[in-house]
Amino acid sequence: MKLIQRIGYYLGGFSLGLIILAFFLSGKKTSCSYGPDARVLKNINSKKIIYSPEVKQSINDKYTDSSEISTILKKGDINFSDSNPRQAPCGIYSIEGEHKNRNIQLTVENCDSIATIKSFKINS
């Protein structure tokens, strides 16, 4: 078998495999959450989100809105030095992110079935 035939068979099988893979994974919520930040944020976003009274007051006073908090929870970075993930019964995480040119820090209590936004702070 010539080299060009081998390359042709390889590319044919590879492209067929990509088509089958795309067919099986289409419409599914697949993601690659390998880093520690991505895993924790995915875990928090998979739960029911509850706002503490202080955060509800910030939303009512128009300092922030729930879409801004949701964006930080999806795209933010976890500051593990300010977090206490092993605290019983619920871990505490400090999540920092930027939205509309504002640096925002959230403190989230991550329990088994719910995640509570404990505080909202705008850093300069």
Image: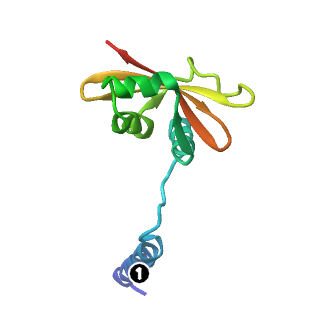
34 versus 31 height, above or below = above
Q: Which residue is mark 1?
A: 16
Can residue 93 be seen in this snapshot?
A: yes
Residue at the image point whose x is 66% and y is 37% from the top? 111
Q: Residue 70 location in percent, x, y? A: 40, 39
Q: Decide if residue 117 is on the left or right side of residue 85.
A: left
| Residue appearing at x 54%, y 48% in the figure | 46
The foreground one among 69 and 40 is 69
Looking at the picture, tell me which residue is in the foreground, 81 or 20: 81
Which quadrant of the figure has residue 71? top left
Residue for point 65% across, 44% down: 113
The colour scheme applied to this rendered structure is rainbow
Count of numbered labels shown in the rendering: 1
- Quadrant of the rendered image containing residue 15: bottom left
Front residue of 58 and 80? 58
Q: Amino acid at mark 1?
A: Leu
Location of residue 8 (image quadrant) = bottom left
Location of residue 10 in the rendering, given as x and y in whole percent from the top left corner: 42, 78
The x and y percentages for residue 28 are 47, 67
Q: Quadrant of the C terminus?
A: top left
Residues 92 and 18: in front is: 92
Q: Which residue is painted at 64% across and 22% down in the image?
A: 84
Q: Circle 1: is it few (<14), some (14-19), or many (20+) Cα within 10 Å?
A: few
Q: Residue furthest left?
A: 101
Residue 89 pos. (x, y %): 74, 31
Q: Secondary structure at mark 1?
A: helix
Q: Residue furthest right?
A: 88
Is residue 119 in sight in this rendering? no
